[in-house]
Amino acid sequence: MILRAYEVGRYVWEEILQEGRAPYGHNVVQRIAEHPQLEISRSSLFNCISLARAYPELGAGRVPERLKGLGLSHLYILSRVALPDDRRWYERRALKKRWSVRRLEAYAASHDYQRPVEDNAPSLDETDDAKAIAAPVWLEEGEYSTDAMARTLRAVGPASFRVLPSRTQLRGWDRVLMDCGLGTVRAEDLCLLRAFVEIADARGHGNVSVSTEGNAIVVSAEGMSLRIDRAELTG
């Protein structure tokens, strides 16, 4: 089924749509799906095309060893992961954790296909007590380039953060503590820091400053400021 779906997607993409005609793809796929002699939906066709583009190695006529154990529906979800390194991470994680299709889709959607920094990074389905882990960003007091800090902080939280993360995106991060160099903070607060720096960067602020006040870390940029209270480990 995987190889057949690949061949359908490859044919539609390479022989009908072609690279240069991608803007017309939706209309062409719709017409193919409406053909009376075909029993395939528009969404299935798009899944096949996505599969063919993400996994060209299927053109060899066999499923790679690393993908064995994953079903076609798993691969449809994985094929929509934009970055190959992120896709490989999800492949390994789905096999290791034996994720169902629904679980893989929910986890990938909550992270907007952005893999955590390390394989042991916090998972949103963990229910154990808060614990400290290494943060993907290390802070010291001083001035930082807004653009550089924004790039670094994109490793924190879902890739879909724009302006301010939603409660759904932050779900679970309030239970995870990270050592960011200036103390232990909630991963949720680093997610908010990421949004703060992206706003500063979008407004053209060249630098952000980091300082400490009592038990808090203060980040500011030309009239904007964010206060992050340091947490204490218990137990």
Image: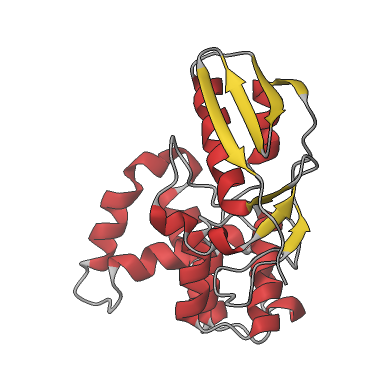
Given residues 217 and 170, the one toward you in this image is 217
Number of numbered callouts drawn: 0
Q: Residue at left 66%, top 46%?
A: 230
Task: Name which quarter of the figure residue 205 lies in.
Answer: top right
Q: How is the image coloured?
A: secondary structure
Q: Is residue 180 left or right of residue 36?
A: right
Front-lying residue, 201 or 140: 140
Residue drawn 23% across the image and 59% down it: 31
Residue extending furthest front? 214
Q: Is residue 129 above or below residue 116?
A: below
Residue 211: where, in percent of width, then height?
A: 71, 26
The answer to whether residue 223 is above or below residue 94 is: above
Check the picture and name the quadrant holding the C terminus.
bottom right
Q: Can you see residue 216?
A: yes
Q: With 40 as the anchor, is 108 left or right in this view?
A: right
Residue 112 is situated, as x and y percent measured from the top left of the image, at: 50, 55
Query: Is residue 140 depicted above or below 167 in this figure?
Result: above
- Is any part of residue 10 visible from this angle? no
The image quarter containing residue 69 is bottom right
Q: Residue at x 66, y 52 (%)?
A: 231
**Which of these two is toward me, 218 or 87?**
218
- Residue 217, relative to residue 88: is it above or below? above
Q: At which x and y percent is residue 195?
A: 52, 36
Residue in the image at 51% along x and 20% along y: 224
Q: Position of residue 127 (x, y in %)?
A: 57, 77
